[in-house]
Image (tube, grey):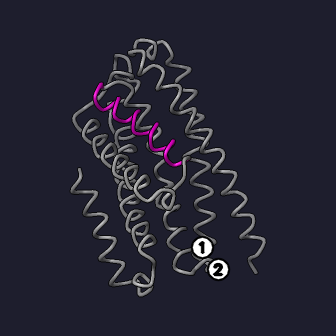
C-alpha cells in the first residue's frame, strides 16, 4: 500500500524531470505539490477502477444476491479500501505539513470524513457498497490535477485547458452531483437494512455523503463559474 503510493510519487518526479523542462524551474513547494498530485491521480485511477468493477461487474452488491447489501464484503473490496486509507492518511499528513500550501480547511474536512468512513467500513465490513459508490466520484480527480498541471505549466490559454475545463465540468456533474443523488435514493430504498448496522456505521452512512455532497455542490459552482469565465475569454 505505502509502496504503491511512494512509487507513484517518485514516478511523477522522475518522469516530470525528464519530459517537462519547466519542472526544474518550479519552486520547492510547487514540485512537492506536482508530485503529490501525481500520487493523487494514481490513487484515483486505481480506486475508481476497483469501485466500478465491484459495483457494476461483480455480484457482490447485486440485488440478485440474498441478504442485506450493507454487510457484504470480500477480500478484494477490503484490501482496496486499505489502499485508500493509506492514501488519505498520506495526503492529509502532507496537507498539515505544508499547510495551507496544499489546501485549506475544506480539504482537511474532506479528507478527514473520507478517512473515517473508509477506515470504519474496511475494519467492520459494513456499508462497503455505499463507500464504493462515493469513491466512484474520485474519477474527477485526474481532471482536477491535470487542470493544475496545465495552469502551472503556463498553458492556461491553450485548447487543452479549455477541453479539460469542459470535461471536468461534465465529470463533476455526473460523478459528484447526480451519483450522490442516486446514493441518497438507494439509502432511502434500503433504510431497513441500514438500520441493522452498528450505530456508528448507521450515522456515517447519512452524515458522510451529506457533508461531501454539500462540499461537492459548492465546488461545482466554482467550476461552473470558471468554465463560463474561460469560455467568455476564448476567441
Looking at the image, residue 207 sits to the left or right of residue 173; the answer is left
State whether residue 185 is above or below residue 165.
Answer: above
State whether residue 188 is above or below residue 139.
Answer: above
Residue 217 quadrant: top right
Magenta part, dominant SS: helix
Residue 180 quadrant: top right
Considering depth in this image, is 97 or 102 the residue closer to the camera? 97
Residue appearing at x 38%, y 22% in the figure: 70
Magenta stretch: includes residue 116: yes
Q: CB atoms at circles 1 and 2 under 8 Å apart?
A: yes
For label 1, the SS is helix
Magenta stretch: includes residue 82: no
For label 2, the SS is loop
State whether residue 154 is above or below residue 167.
Answer: below
Residue bearing the label numbered 1: 161
Work out which residue is located at the far bottom of the displayed protein and give it.
21
Residue appearing at x 62%, y 38% in the figure: 214
Residue bearing the label numbered 2: 157
Question: Can you say which quadrant of the picture contains the C terminus?
Answer: bottom right
Looking at the image, residue 25 sits to the left or right of residue 71; the answer is right
Percent position of residue 207, x then y: 53, 27
Q: Residues within 10 Å of mark 1 (few under 14, many from 20)?
A: many
Percent position of residue 28, x then y: 41, 74
Considering depth in this image, is 71 or 225 the residue closer to the camera? 225
Considering depth in this image, is 181 or 214 the residue closer to the camera? 214
Q: Residues within 10 Å of mark 2 (few under 14, many from 20)?
A: few
Q: CA distance from mark 1 to mark 2?
A: 7 Å
Residue appearing at x 49%, y 18% in the figure: 190
Q: Which residues are magenta?
A: 106-124
Looking at the image, residue 126 sits to the left or right of residue 6; the answer is right
Amino acid at each position: 500500500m505505502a509502496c504503491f503510493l511512494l512509487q507513484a510519487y517518485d514516478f511523477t518526479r522522475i518522469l516530470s524531470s525528464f519530459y517537462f523542462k519547466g519542472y526544474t524551474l518550479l519552486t520547492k513547494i510547487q514540485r512537492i505539490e506536482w508530485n503529490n498530485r501525481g500520487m493523487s491521480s494514481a490513487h484515483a485511477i486505481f480506486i475508481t477502477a476497483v469501485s466500478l468493477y465491484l459495483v457494476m461487474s461483480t455480484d457482490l452488491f447485486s440485488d440478485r444476491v440474498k441478504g442485506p447489501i450493507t454487510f457484504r464484503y470480500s477480500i478484494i473490496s477490503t484490501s482496496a479500501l486499505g489502499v485508500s486509507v493509506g492514501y488519505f492518511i498520506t495526503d492529509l499528513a502532507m496537507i498539515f505539513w505544508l499547510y495551507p500550501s496544499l489546501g485549506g480547511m475544506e480539504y482537511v474536512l474532506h479528507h478527514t470524513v473520507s478517512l473515517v468512513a473508509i477506515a470504519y467500513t474496511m475494519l467492520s465490513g459494513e456499508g462497503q457498497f455505499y463507500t464504493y459508490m462515493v469513491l466512484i466520484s474520485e474519477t474527477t480527480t485526474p481532471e482536477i490535477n491535470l487542470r493544475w498541471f496545465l495552469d502551472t505549466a503556463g498553458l492556461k490559454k491553450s485548447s487543452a485547458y479549455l477541453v479539460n475545463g469542459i470535461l471536468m465540468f461534465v465529470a463533476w456533474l455526473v460523478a459528484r452531483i447526480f451519483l450522490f443523488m442516486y446514493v441518497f435514493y438507494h439509502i432511502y430504498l434500503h433504510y431497513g437494512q441500514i438500520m441493522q448496522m452498528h450505530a456508528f456505521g448507521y450515522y456515517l452512512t447519512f452524515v458522510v455523503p451529506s457533508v461531501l455532497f454539500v462540499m461537492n455542490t459548492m465546488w461545482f459552482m466554482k467550476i461552473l463559474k470558471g468554465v463560463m469565465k474561460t469560455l467568455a475569454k476564448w476567441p
